[in-house]
Amino acid sequence: MYGLPSLIPHEIEEKGQSMRTSTSPDSTAASTPPEANRVRIFDTTLRDGEQSPGASMNMAEKLELARALAALGVDVIEAGFPIASQGDFEAVRAIAAEVAGSSVCGLARCNDRDIDRAWEAIQFAQHPRIHVFLATSAIHREHKLRMTKAQIIERAVASVRRAKSCCPDVEFSPEDAARTELEFLCEVVQAAIEAGATTVNIPDTVGYATPIQYASVIAALKQRVPNIERAIISTHCHDDLGLAVANSLAGCEAGARQVECTINGIGERAGNASLEEVVMALKTRFDYYGLTTKIRTERLYPTSRMLSAITGLAVQRNKAIVGRNAFAHEAGIHQDGLLKERSTYEIMRPEDVGVPRTDLVLGKHSGRHALRERVTEMGYTLSDEQLETLFHDFKALADKKKEVYDEDLVVLIEKHLDDVPPLWQLVSLHTTAGMSVLPTATVAIRRPDGEIVQDAAIGDGPVDAIFKAVERVTGVRANLHQFVVRSVTQGKDAQGEVTLELEVESDDRSYRGRAASTDIIEASAQAYLNAVNAIATHRERGHVREVVGRPGAGA
């Protein structure tokens, strides 16, 4: 039905065999121009990644992550989908104006309104890019768009031309390309390049392809599209079958020279290709691929931790490259081998991806200068005022804890990146609970007008009682959708981080609250109040999100 090739072309097989004989960068560079061997990294954490359920970020968090991505060395930052909402538009515009070193890209559907809005958001970027997309597969043409092949090509050409009139750097994505008939895909790609597209992205939108099949699509485009050398071929693979990274690497092997990916692999459904996995596969197996990137790999781990702290989506322990167990060895045979020769059981060095030998770097006797240095090393940019506030919080935590870890610092820093003003502030909290005691909670909360209000409630447990007491004081009623408690660091005195989501029946969206403390009861109260503040702020601003549907190209 979809015309997806089932066999890998001979030239890919031959390339793979010849690459296996290459053992050094010099052997490849001698016969191929260096630029032809470089894979551009297109990071879509802020756009596709944020569509991952529970991964929404406020503007301050997006800006901080965008700075970290630029410091990481990504070539293109897809900052968002400007037409989706006023908040998305403002975030993209702020990133475009402030972040240097990487191209800043805005996503647009193939219509004039989307394209104009995207250009309005990114026009002041150092290197702006507009990314337009239109579905091409039979299933999308027939059931979603209800357009003919001729209409698809006509719309794609018109949209690329409009984007090109605004911006010299234009990317085109035929959504669901991996399930599009190959002959038609070649026609669309050729027309888009002729209209001015400088990058053509080949999305495996639903994670349907397999590596050999996906590579054969890329190879066929290089063979059959006469003007293909005028554009860079990009991959964008989803992980529904767990093949996103494998497909992306297969695409590179077949001739793609841009990979679209996200930090920690977050994204719609099962997620996207993981940036850190793609980058380290290319670096570690240069002997096979002969390809390079501009990524500063020692910043991979700090950037991964930053995203995890911002979104509250913890990285699984056995996650490749950045998981806690990625460089951990417990088996005696492995430990013995490592002590004799590291390469027996480690194909990468922890320091190559920024994994610290120890997280403990600061204590209660540390000064402001040491704190600033560590914060900068971790990829954060704080003003003098923010740093001063952080320093006081750090000292207070250091008095409570015997050891302060990087993860503790991340929690403190994130508290100062929240752009939701604390309309309601927790002044005091008292709970009573036990096996033969009715759980109760008493809270004192400062209202927006400065008045301190006290109230109490009973519940199924101390946390439930706190939530009910806060609800009584604030008058904000919501349903608890998710409640997660995790230890920020190791040890009995570790901070407990609470992440929760509230849903309001009259408002078709959820609100996230996060807080940490050495007392998880206190953290629960603060996290709940933070979510309540988000609801109150949303209502106060009278902000109504414009619902346009989630983008699919790159998705």
Image (cartoon, grey):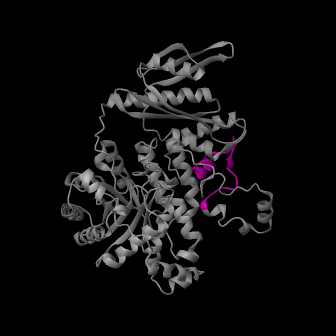
Query: Residue 85, image x and y in percent?
Result: 30, 43
Say if the magenta span includes residue 331: no
User: Does residue 422 appear anywhere in the picture?
Assistant: no
Residue 85 sits above or below residue 114 on the image: above
What range is drawn magenta here? Answer: 353-376
* Quadrant showing the C terminus: bottom left
User: Does residue 486 appear anywhere in the picture?
Assistant: yes
Q: Residue at x 33, y 55 (%)?
A: 106
Q: Residue at x 70, y 52 (%)?
A: 358
Q: Residue at x 51, y 22 (%)?
A: 467
Q: Quadrant of residue 328?
A: bottom right
21 vs 102, nearest the viewer: 21
Query: Residue 506, image x and y in percent?
Result: 34, 26
Q: Residue at x 52, y 53 (%)?
A: 264
210 relative to 352 in the view: left or right: left
* Quadrant showing the N terminus: bottom left
Query: Residue 446, image x and y in percent?
Result: 48, 20
Farthest residue in the front direction? Answer: 1
401 relative to 109 in the view: left or right: right
Say if the magenta span includes residue 361: yes
25 vs 254, nearest the viewer: 254
Query: Residue 274, image x and y in percent?
Result: 51, 58
Farthest residue in the bottom direction? Answer: 31
128 vs 436, nearest the viewer: 436
